Image: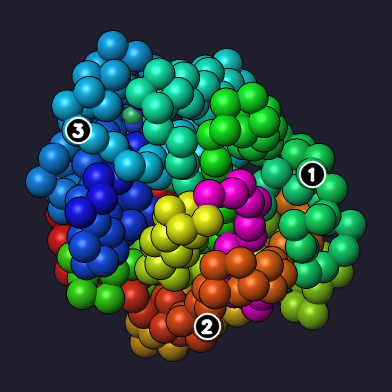
Amino acid sequence: MKNILVLGGAGYIGSHTVKKLLIKGFNPIVVDNLVYGHKAAVLAKDFYQIDIGDKIALNSVFKKHKIDAVVHFAAFAYVGESVTQPQKYYHNNLINTINVLDCMIENDIKNIVFSSTCATYGNPQYSPLDEKHPQNPINPYGQTKFMVEKVMDDYDRAYGLKSICLRYFNAAGADKDGQLAEKHNPETHLIPLVLQTALGEREYINVFGNDYDTPDGTCIRDYIHVEDLADAHILALEKLFTEPKSYRINLGTGIGTSVNEIIKSAERVTGKEIPVLYVDRREGDPAKLVASNEYAQEILYWIPKYVKIDDIVESAYKVMVNPPF
Ligand SMILES: NC(=O)c1ccc[n+]([C@@H]2O[C@H](COP(=O)([O-])OP(=O)(O)OC[C@H]3O[C@@H](n4cnc5c(N)ncnc54)[C@H](O)[C@@H]3O)[C@@H](O)[C@H]2O)c1
């Protein structure tokens, strides 16, 4: 049985991936400092409350378990905050990740799957975005992920460290069994915010701009179900074990959904009317961000199963009305 060290495995995407790893017969070992994660979301038997910046503690985990590969989710991911507090982001997302890579080299571990993002592309020059699109991040969050990709390129050339950087679009939804959920605090993601509004926890949902050059004037994004993301991590690990080579791969459905369409979907799923407040555009929000997932299909044989937005929204709603933790 292969031992997979999951950094940030108490978080949203990490916890769903841990569940998939267990189902697929891997042995996940979770490290999370619980700054944003939830202990109750960790389904693995081995859990260490450690900061990935703590080299001594991290090394002790590497020494205790014979790690075959690392899956690295641990990061800060609030774009707005990264603009006002870049130091926090460069320290955690970049410097701490270099710490992880150095520990891997010290312990002769050569395979890592990394959570990158479509935010590394910046403003799209064409759509759908493929992996050849220029990477010009427009905020420190995207910049940190872009820099990590570059560090990993150099570590591959110099030390033979193989990395698959998965550039997620908008992660959404929750475990179909209702065992795990998206529980960010503060929550900034659209689907949970819209559902909280449907449940009366918010007075209205703010929609930032309805004068974009899109069919209904609101921004279009590519919502990818968290279970589909988890599946892609398993495929990426299997790829590294069978054919060690570095890749940078988009993970999205290839389908664009506007903010208004999300609200309509949430109204169908919940049966409730959702009050909307249209406000000014936010700086740095492109009109449309949609993935080309052809490369993921070609390299990982990955095809997303959740393609209907109502199914994604419904899975999120199910755990919101019946929270697992
Ligand atoms: N959610 C999305 O839509 C999305 C999109 C693109 C990329 N990503 C990336 O995917 C990854 C996971 O995102 P998520 O939505 O699950 O976030 P999350 O906040 O739910 O999970 C991240 C986890 O990492 C932990 N963590 C952070 N810094 C740490 C440190 N120094 N040491 C130990 N643990 C630490 C947190 O406590 C948390 O449990 C992140 O790297 C994020 O940048 C997310």
**Magenta span covers which residues?**
244-258
- 72 or 70: nearer the viewer: 70
Q: Residues within 10 Å of mark 2 (few under 14, many from 20)?
A: some
Queried whether the magenta region covers residue 77, the answer comes back as: no
Residue 259: image quadrant is: bottom right
Quarter that holds the N terminus: bottom left
x and y percentages locating residue 166 in the rendered image: 56, 53
Which tag is nearer the camera, tag 1 or tag 3? 3
List x then y, in percent, for residue 196.
37, 63
Query: Which residue is drawn at the image coordinates 29% and 19% (left, top)?
Result: 59
| In this rendering, position of residue 102 left or right of residue 142 | left
Q: Does any portion of residue 139 appear in the rendered image? A: yes
Farthest-out residue, top: 56
Tell me the quarter of the image containing the C terminus: bottom left
Residue type, mark 1 in image: Gln
Please state which of the two labelled residues, at mark 2 or mark 3, is closer to the viewer.
Answer: 3
- Dot 1 lies on which element? loop
Disc 1 residue: CB within 8 Å of ligand 1: no
Q: Check if mark 1's residue and mark 2's residue have beta carbons within 8 Å.
A: no
Cα separation between marks 1 and 2? 27 Å
- Give coordinates of residue 189: x percent, y percent: 49, 55
* Residue 238 higher or lower than 101, as above or below: below
Q: Which three-letter amino acid code belongs to the residue tagged 3? A: His
Q: Residue at x 16, y 53 (%)?
A: 43
Residue highlighted by disc 2: 307
Residue 135, labelled with which disc? 1
Using residue 243 as the reference point, say whether residue 199 is left or right of it.
left
Q: CA distance from mark 1 to mark 3?
A: 36 Å
Instruction: Left or right? Give the position of 25 relative to 262.
Output: left
